[in-house]
Image: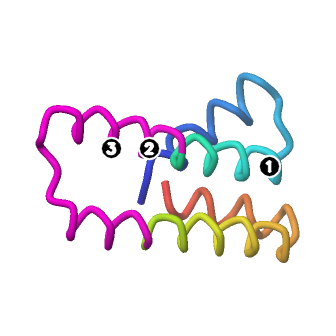
């Protein structure tokens, strides 16, 4: 489970985001923070590129299918799944 699960309750509870928008925003945050972390670590020579590419591609696929799934299910079920993941 990535950082999106931690960001979504704040977006929904404090900023009153709709759950569908919170999921997309949270997944965007994961992509952005992962990219920034990669650039930072790569600039210091601390990246195993073969492993990083595999993890990066897996993360992008996860974000893609997460957004697709989020738009395919209704809000009530999505809230239950979010609570189950947390």
Q: Residues within 10 Å of mark 2 (few under 14, many from 20)?
A: few
Q: Could you tell whether 19 is left or right of 31 in the image?
A: right
**C-beta proximity under 8 Å, tags 1 and 2:** no
Q: Position of residue 81 (x, y in %)?
A: 63, 67
Taking the spot 73% from the left edge, 75% from the top edge, the residue there is 69
Taking the spot 41% from the left edge, 60% from the top edge, the residue there is 1
Between the residue at mark 3 and the residue at mark 2, the CA separation in whole angstroms equals 5 Å
Q: Is residue 53 above or below residue 46?
A: below
> Dot 2 lies on which element?
helix
**C-beta proximity under 8 Å, tags 3 and 2:** yes
Q: Position of residue 48 (x, y in %)?
A: 14, 59
> Dot 1 lies on which element?
helix
Q: Could you tell whether 44 is left or right of 35 in the image?
A: left
User: Could you say which is closer to the camera, residue 38 or residue 75?
Assistant: 38
Q: Examine the residues drawn in magenta and state their main secondary structure.
A: helix
**C-beta proximity under 8 Å, tags 1 and 3:** no
Q: Which residue is mark 3?
A: 38
Q: Could you tell whether 45 is left or right of 8 in the image?
A: left
> Dot 3 lies on which element?
helix
Between the residue at mark 1 and the residue at mark 3, the CA separation in whole angstroms equals 28 Å
Q: Earlier in the sequence, mark 1 or mark 3?
A: 1
Q: Which residue is mark 2?
A: 35
- Residue 66: which quarter of the image? bottom right
Q: Which residues are magenta?
A: 32-57
Q: Which residue is mark 1?
A: 19
Q: Earlier in the sequence, mark 1 or mark 2?
A: 1
Q: Is residue 8 above or below residue 20?
A: above
Q: Residues within 10 Å of mark 1 (few under 14, many from 20)?
A: many
């Amino acid at each position: 489970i990535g950082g999106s699960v931690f960001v979504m309750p704040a977006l929904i509870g404090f900023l009153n985001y709709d759950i569908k928008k919170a999921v997309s925003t949270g997944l965007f945050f994961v992509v952005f923070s992962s990219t920034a972390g990669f650039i930072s670590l790569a600039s210091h020579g601390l990246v195993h590129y073969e492993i990083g590419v595999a993890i990066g591609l897996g993360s992008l696929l996860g974000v893609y299918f997460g957004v697709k799934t989020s738009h395919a299910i209704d809000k009530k079920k999505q809230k239950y799944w979010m609570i189950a993941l947390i």
